[in-house]
Image (cartoon, helix red, strand yellow):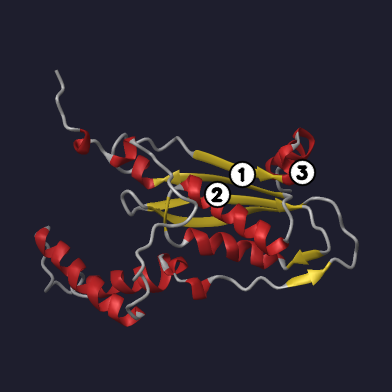
Amino acid sequence: MDRREDNDQDPEEDHLTGSLETPLRPDAFALTDEQKIDGIEYHFKEIMQLLGLDLEDDSLKGTPRRVAKMYVKEIFDGLKPENRPHAKLFENRYGYRQMLVERDITLYSSCEHHFVPIIGKAHVAYIPNEHVIGLSKLNRIVQYYGRRPQVQERLTRQIAQELRDVLRTENVAVLIEADHLCVMSRGVNDVTSSTITSEYSGLFEQDAYRLEFMQAIRHNKS
C-alpha cells in the first residue's frame, strides 16, 4: 500500500491556479535591482557549488552573475509594476466596430513550479468602442505578464483583464498555445503535447464571435 504523505506529491500534480494576482510578498520591491542581483548571484553560486561544479572554470565563473542579471533585468522584469506598458489609446476616428485580431504573438514565460521556460504563441482580439490601441501595445501587454513566474491559466486571465481595463471594453478574447519544458524536459518527457488556454468576455461569449476569432487565428499565412 502506498503510504506517501500528501506533502511528498509533486506540486505539478495539484495544479492550483490561485488568485488572478501573481503571488508576491508585501516587501517584494524593498530591494533595488542591484541588491537583488547581488543576492541571487550569491545564492546561485551556492547552488552550483552544491552540484559540484568548478566555479574557477572560465566557462562557469561568470554564470552566477549572468543568471542573476537575466532573472532581474530580463525574464522576470514583468514583476515590477513600473515596467507595465503604457498603453496610449487613440480615438476610433474610423468608426471601426468589427473584430481586431493580433495573432501569433511570441510568448516566453517561466513555469513557477520548476522555473523552466514556457514557450508559445498568444492570440488576442477585441472589438473597439470609442478608442483603439497601438498594435505593438498588444504585444507588450502579453510580454509584460509573460515575464514573471507563471501558470498558463493565470497568465491568460491577466492578459485578458489588462486588455479589458486598458481598452475600456468587455469585448476581449485571449487564447494561448504553449509548450512547457517542465513537461518536455523532465517528468513524463512528452515533447509532442501542448497546452491551450482561453478567456472570452463580452461579445466573445457568443458562439458567432468566438467562431470568427478561431477562424482568424487558424487561417494559414500566405
Task: Report the Cα–Cα distance between label 3 and label 1.
Answer: 12 Å
Front-lying residue, 204 or 67: 204
Label 1: which residue? 199
Q: Give the image location of residue 191, x and y in percent.
A: 40, 38
Residue indicated by mark 3: 203
Q: Position of residue 133 (x, y in %)?
A: 73, 66
Disc 2 residue type (three-letter): Thr
Image quadrant of residue 16?
A: top left
- Residue 4 can be seen, yes or no: yes
Q: CA distance from mark 1 to mark 2?
A: 7 Å
- State yes or no: discs 3 and 2 in contact (Cβ < 8 Å): no
Label 1: few (<14), some (14–19) or many (≥20) C-alpha neighbours in 10 Å = some
Look at label 3 and name its amino acid. Answer: Leu
Question: What secondary structure is found at the residue carrying circle 3?
Answer: helix
Question: Callout 2: few (<14), some (14-19), or many (20+) C-alpha neighbours within 10 Å?
Answer: many
As drawn, 43 above or below 13: below
Q: Nearer the viewer, residue 44 or 131?
A: 131
Q: Is residue 173 above or below residue 148?
A: above
**Do the numbered discs 1 and 2 sit on residues whose CB atoms are within 8 Å?**
yes
Question: Which residue is drawn at the image coordinates 49% and 71% (left, top)?
Answer: 81
Q: Earlier in the sequence, mark 3 or mark 2?
A: 2
Residue at far front of view: 26
The residue under the point 55% across, 41% down is 197
- Residue flagged by tag 1: what amino acid is it? Glu
In the image, residue 131 sits, relative to residue 101, either above or below, namely below
Q: Which residue occupies the foreground of this view, 216 or 202?
A: 202
Position of residue 101 measured from the top left corner of the image (x, y, whole percent): 73, 52
The number of numbered badges drawn on the structure is 3
Nearer the N terminus, badge 1 or badge 2? 2
The residue at the point 29 percent across, 41 percent down is 11
Q: Which mark is residue 156?
A: 2
Q: Residue at x 33, y 48 (%)?
A: 113
